[in-house]
Amino acid sequence: MACSCRNNPTIVAINGSKSEIKIGRELQLVTITTVTSGSSPVTTATAGDVKFVGISLEVTPQITGSKLIALKVKPVKSSIFQKNTISGNTFYDIDKREGDLNIILRDGQTAAIGGLVDTSVNKSTTKVPLLGDIPLLGNLFKTTSDVKSETNLIIFITATVLEPSKMKYDNVVGQDQINDLELTQRDILGRNYTKSDEENALQEQVGVVRQKKQDAEAIKTLAAEAAIAAGTKKKPD
């Protein structure tokens, strides 16, 4: 049995307000309409609703007076069960797992939500090299079987109360997420970033070099204009 951490998102919600995160894709559904005109049926396809497929999580927090956090959590996991084509138009059968539960946690506690099991059956073909590729006769040298696999999605939720006066960026975003984005402290803090003496000295040197380059370009431009003006004056009438 293999286990892997697929995503580590962070949701910030105002007390009593719903927040939602979605990880997946959207499918454009098609509406098929058949109208019989005389003896010939006419089939038309029009764009229908857009359906989200993937993992979504709705969270509505409510902080009590004793600093307990009541969470209303709605996890949804959906996937494409089957794809069908009618009159050249594709539509999908969607398999869906959904939960609706209430959790009470203390500040910093973690809860685990399981039971979102996804079962899939895939065809697996085993054949004898070369012999299994022979047309018609190759069927005698290969076997086809159904392989059943189950995926159990477990969602871990850690609830933390954020106080605006004490909140910092690392209370919301984990250090591993910052490292994955290759962000530095300067990128995050922006204007509030305090430069070291070495950085200030280096920036001053860069400014001096830039100013010298601009001065040299200005002198070159003035010299060229003066040469043109002098040449114009020497021209005979």
Image (spheres, rainbow, N blue to C red):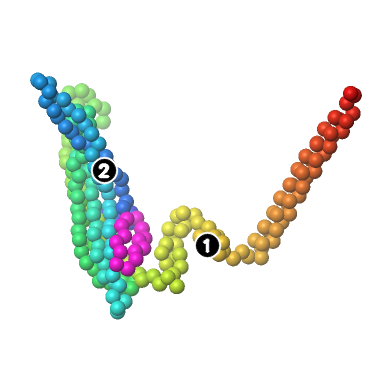
Q: Is residue 220 above or below residue 88?
A: below
Residue under the point 80% across and 40% down: 222
Residue under the point 36% across and 63% down: 12
Residue under the point 43% across and 60% down: 176
Judged from the image, the secondary structure of the residue bearing numbered disc 1 is: helix
Report the amino acid beneath label 2: Val
192 in magenta: no
Drawn side of residue 223 relative to residue 172, left or right: right
Q: CA distance from mark 1 to mark 2?
A: 38 Å
Q: Is residue 55 above or below residue 105?
A: above
Residue under the point 36% across and 60% down: 10
Q: Which mark is residue 153?
A: none
Residue 112 visible in the picture: no
Name the foreground residue: 203 vs 135.
Answer: 203
Q: Which residues are magenta?
A: 7-21
Q: What residue is disc 1 on?
A: 189
Dividing the image into 4 quarters, which one contains the N terminus?
bottom left
Mark 2: give few (<14), some (14-19) or many (20+) Cα within 10 Å.
Answer: few
Judged from the image, the secondary structure of the residue bearing numbered disc 2 is: strand
Q: What residue is disc 2 on?
A: 50
* N-terminal-most mark, 1 or 2: 2
Residue 7 locus on image (x, y percent):
34, 55
Drawn side of residue 27 relative to residue 212, left or right: left
